[in-house]
Image (cartoon, grey):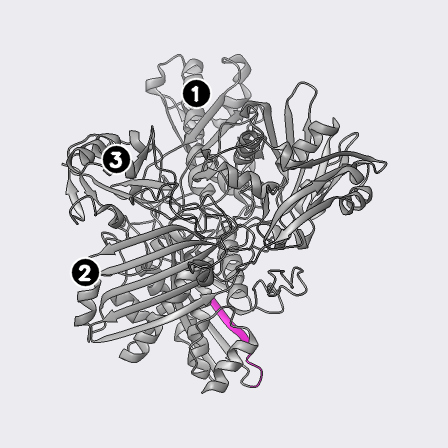
Amino acid sequence: MATADLRSTEKPAYKVIGTRPVRHDGVDKVTGRAQYGADVRLTGMLHAAMLRSPYAHATVKNIDTSKAEAVPGVRAVVTSADLPDHGDRMVELGEGAVNMRHLATNVLAGDKVLYKGHAVAAVAADDVHTAREAVKLIEVEYELLEPVLDVRQAMEPTAPVLNDDVRTQSVGGADPGDDAKPTNVAKHILFEKGNAAEAFETAHLVVEREFHTATVHQGYIEPHNATAVWNADGKVTVYTSTQGSFTVRQQTAELLRIPVSDVKVVPMEIGGGFGGKISVYLQPVAVLLSRKSGRPVKLVMDRADVFEATGPTPGSYIRVKLGVSEEGKLVAGDAYLAYEAGAYPGSPVGPGCMCIFSCYDFPTARVEGFDVCVNKPRTNAYRAPGSTNACFAVDTVMDELAAKLGIDPAEFRLMNAAEEGTRRVDGPVYNRIGMVETVEAIKQSEHYNSPLEGPNRGRGIATGFWFNAGLNSSVSATVNLDGTVSLVEGSTDIGGTRTSIAMQFAETLGITAEAVKPAVVDTDSVGYTDVTGGSRVTFATGIAAVEAAKDVMAQLVERAALVWGCSADDVTYSDGAAHGPNGENLHFDEIAERLNTTGGPVIGSGTCSGVNQSGAFGTHCVDVEVDPDTGKVQILRYTVAQDAGTAIHPDYVEGQMQGGAVQGIGWALNEEYWYDGEGSMRNATFLDYRIPTCYDVPMIETIIVEVPDPNHPYGVRGVGEVPICPPPAAIANAVHQAVGVRMQQLPMSPPRVLAEILKK
Amino acid sequence: MPRVFVPPSLRDLTDGLAEVDVEGGTVVAVIEALDARFPGAAGRLRQGDSLKPGLAVVVDGEASAMGLLQKVGPEAEVHFLPAIGGG
């Protein structure tokens, strides 16, 4: 592992930042004492089971729950009739506005089911076996409708329409009005920079290709779960695995039309999310069952439920056309992206359109995108949502152009790289970014410069981009008499963020990371905090922690001034100690020890709001060997170079780089939802839906590039998402070098690769 | 004067202009000025006291959580883009 020294300014001499302390929750995690949602057990707790649609598209004519209700031990049954009607309400839920009717009918289907696995009803009983047996007794009368599973087929005017309230919306476009014909095309996006059509006429070389990517799942190991208690006083508590306790609180309250302050969400430890644990599925249903039964109710998905009913990331069709000059400079780009939204509008085609040309400086370009409903589960965020699909398309064409021009692929990217001041195709101008530095890091790496020998072996590179989010975070800190600090935060810890937040607090206050005791708490116990998503926690919650430390520091200065009988204006604080006007020093520990005789508790708080990140780039290099007889692609060596701004805890930065790359490798080579003609997923288990294991990938080598983000006090950039973007393109480019075929469909599974080889 | 980068789908109202300079110290003021010059523009960008659902405003390269209330400098660039969420 390496850190590339590519800063434009000298790195400050940090004492905590950049070190690798043991994570605060490490012992609980490795001893199994950490409490996950499935571990929740409450007195009198019932267990619930869900009835799910066996059909991909059908009208629900009638639901008869009477036989289920009559089963001994059954305490409550709920259907969509138990949810309030939401009409056309749109509600802002932190990361964007949500159509409440769509959210509600995704939680419990209304008069239609839109995908196999769509929740229809739920039963709470004394034990889970009784609940599951009772679910089988619920009689649902369906009228089958033709499903549509392919994004381009769903765009046809003759395609079956999923939602009769969906019309095509566009950014800045005229409202289509209620009289417009319902459609599966929920959104149309268009970006134009200059006149691309004219510029293509001047190009020396133009390459246009089509790409298809499969529906893939986030693949977190821990299934969704929720345990709810509707108290006799109308107050609700939900214990759940989530990326955002506050968004679960708001979604649950809005869905049930109860005051948000009546809902407390307790975030349990989380066994992976990657964007898939932001939307609610089980939580409102568990609450409804608890209200009806008067008992705590626990509801847990199995793996098939997770695959069939929770947000995958979309399959897509993308067409990319690029034009270059004789010298190898991009002159024009054109892209068409159609993304599957799943059952309800909301695919990440917007960010896909914004990312597809984001790594390069295009003088002219046109990008058009479509958000399209199909009879699959509603898509949800997945690491850099929308960007991986786009990166696969554009960076494969970039590689082809470089090869045809006879230019080294890294050099070709550098010749056309976006940098500070580059105007993006969607309009805004880049702040300080590290695109060039990540390509340079790969170009200079031992991996890129090592020989690759042997038949059917090839090397490929690709570069990806993700915006990263800022949003809102809150932190509070209590100084303890023993010289430690209890740090309270609302960001669910997925990738070691308790420690990365604690380290920024410690650095600011001049104490050790071990002296900070971080805790992730419930929604009643900390200020509003947005989701652990958008690669935002180490950035934004880190800023909140820095502000909290500054707040504590100011109070400690006052205490020291009191001890010394001077003005606080005459006291400074540095290196973990207050310094008086006459050379006096009081270390943090000494001030803490005297808190009760100098004015009592010291509690600091900090928030972050409205601070944006400057974006993250990563360049990957991969060596593969292709078996020409089977089409199997073996990863021989893989290196990730990524701009982390400033790596707070390098272990966790490297972990995100490695984890993201491995998920991207799975997306590239194996993972896909396999549907039959009726819209039934036929591989809804981890045996048949192949995520990579340690047997499939080598150790992922990492190069941490540090180009500090000017919007963060320590220069942090989020690192969680961008590493998933480059793998499919990098591997496709390596496969081409290995066996001479251009793969334009994901996954590049053995049969597909073999079919392309046999076409040669 | 702030410069509004007009989304392509709105250019049917701006005579095809891709960039328009209008007065305004906040996003809402900019939208109102745009609407005064190109009637109907406001209805495409705002809904009541908020931006239209699914829309984000970016001022000088920074996506704003303040929406219509975001301050806009005299030389600012204003972009209306799809709202995005991360994973």
- Residue at horizontal 61 percent and vertical 33 percent from the top: A83
Task: Please tell me which residue lies in front, A483 or A117.
Answer: A117
Q: In the image, what residue type sits under mark 2? A: Asn
The magenta region covers A629-639
Q: Is residue A367 above or below residue A607?
A: below
Task: Please tell me which residue lies in front, A719 or A311.
Answer: A311
Q: Is residue A19 above or below residue A620?
A: above
Q: Pointer 1 and pointer 2: residues touching (CB < 8 Å)?
A: no
Q: Which residue is mark 2?
A: A195
Q: In the image, what residue type sits under mark 3? A: Ala
Task: Please tell me which residue lies in front, A177 or A267.
Answer: A177
Q: Which mark is residue A555?
A: 1
Under circle 1, the secondary element is helix
Q: Which residue is mark 3?
A: B42
Q: Are marks 1 and 2 on the same chain?
A: yes
Q: Residues within 10 Å of mark 2 (few under 14, many from 20)?
A: few
State yes or no: residue A1 in magenta: no
Q: Chain of mark 3?
A: B
